[in-house]
Amino acid sequence: MNNQQNMLLRVILMKKKYNISRREFLTIMNVAGIGFAMSTSNALAEKDNNSETVSFGVVTDLHYADKDMRNNRYYRDSFEKLTECIERFNKLNPDFIIELGDFIDANEKEIEIGYLKKIDSMFRSFKSDRYYVMGNHDIATLSKEEFLSITGASGKYYSFDYGSFHFIVLDGNYNEDGSEYNAGNFIWTETYIHAPQQEWLKKDLEKAHDKTVFVFVHQKLDDKPGDRENLHRVNNAPEVRKILEKVGNVRAVIQGHDHSGGYCIMNGIQYVTLMGAVEGQGLENNKYAIAVIDDHNLHIKGFGKQESFEL
C-alpha cells in the first residue's frame, strides 16, 4: 500500500470517528493531495453528516506454529505478519477486529496451547474490541472450551451490533451427527452447521430484521466456481444459505479456510473469501484487510497480497 492510499484510509476512518461533514472531508482530501481514483473515497465523500459508518480489521488463516515451512506455509512468519497487521490496525483505529479461524496449527496439546497464547498476546494488543471465529486447526488437539478460555472469545457462535449493523459469527466445526469437533475427532472435509445452531441463526436473523447483516465464518458457505469437490465448503451450506436468504437482510458473508481467496454472489448475498496469511514467506506475502461499511455498502481494502473488494 503506497503513502497516498495509506493517507486516504486514515482520512476515511477519521471521517467516521469525528463525524466530519462532506465539505470538510473534501477539503482534507484536497489539502492532502489525494485524488478520487479509489471508489472507497467516492463512496464516503458522497455521504452527508448523518451517514453511519462502521469499520473493522480482518485477518485469517495465520496457522501460527514453531514449525518448518511446508507446502508454502511459513508457520513461524505468522507472528511477524500479525504484528504488522495489528500495528496498522492500531494506527487506523477501526471499531473492531476479527480473525476468521485457523489462528494456530497443530502440535502436541501443551505446545499448541503455547502457540495460542503467544499469537493471541499479539492479537490482544489491539486497542479496541476484538472477535474470534474458530477454525478446524484451532481444535486439532484442544477442545472448543479450551480455545474459548484462553482467548476470551465470546462463544462458539454469537452475534453483536454496531449501530444499525448486525454481525453474526458462525461455527462450522461440527460432525454430520451434530457432535462437536473436539481435539481432533474429525475429518476436516466433513464440516457442518449443526441443527441447534441453525435454529439459533433463524431467530437471530428475525430479531435483526431491521438491520443490515454481515456474517463471519471459517469454512465457506458458497460454491466456488470451478471447485467441483468443494473441499473447503460447509457440507450443508445449501441449507444454511436458505436461512440467510429468507429474511433478506444479509448483505455479505466473509470467510476464510480456502487460502487462495475468492468471491461470488449467490441469490443476492455476496461471499468474500479472504486469503490465508500463512501462505508465502515474509511480510511481502502478508494478507489482511480493513473493511468500511457505510450506507450499507462494504469497502474492503486489502493489504499486502490481499485483494480489495467493493460490494
Image (cartoon, helix red, strand yellow):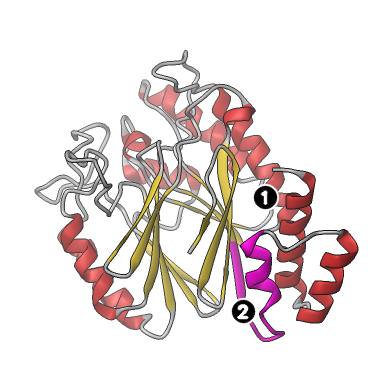
* Label 2 secondary element: loop
* Label 1 secondary element: helix
Label at residue 89: 1
Q: Provide residue 262's location: percent of width, then percent of height.
A: 39, 46
Asked whether, in this view, residue 54 is left or right of residue 211, the answer is right
Q: Looking at the image, can residue 6 be seen?
A: yes
Q: Residue furthest left?
A: 177
Q: Residue furthest top?
A: 68
Q: Provide residue 256's location: percent of width, then percent of height.
A: 39, 45
Query: Disc 2 or 1, which lies upstream in sequence?
Result: 2
> Residue sitting at 16 percent across and 54 percent down?
236
Between marks 2 and 1, how big is the CA–CA gap? 20 Å
Q: Quadrant of residue 291?
A: bottom right
- Of 241 and 31, nearer the camera is 31
Count residues near mark 1 (Cα–Cα under 10 Å), then give few for <14, some for 14-19, many for 20+: many
Q: Which residue is mark 2?
A: 52
Q: Amino acid at mark 1?
A: Phe
> Residue sitting at 21 percent across and 46 percent down?
180
Q: Which residues are magenta?
A: 38-55
Q: Is residue 194 above or below residue 286?
A: below
Label at residue 238: none
How many numbered dots are placed on residues in this image? Answer: 2
Q: Amino acid at mark 2?
A: Glu
> Residue sitting at 77 percent across and 61 percent down?
35
Asked whether, in this view, residue 37 is left or right of residue 242, the answer is right
Q: Provide residue 211's location: percent of width, then percent of height.
A: 43, 81
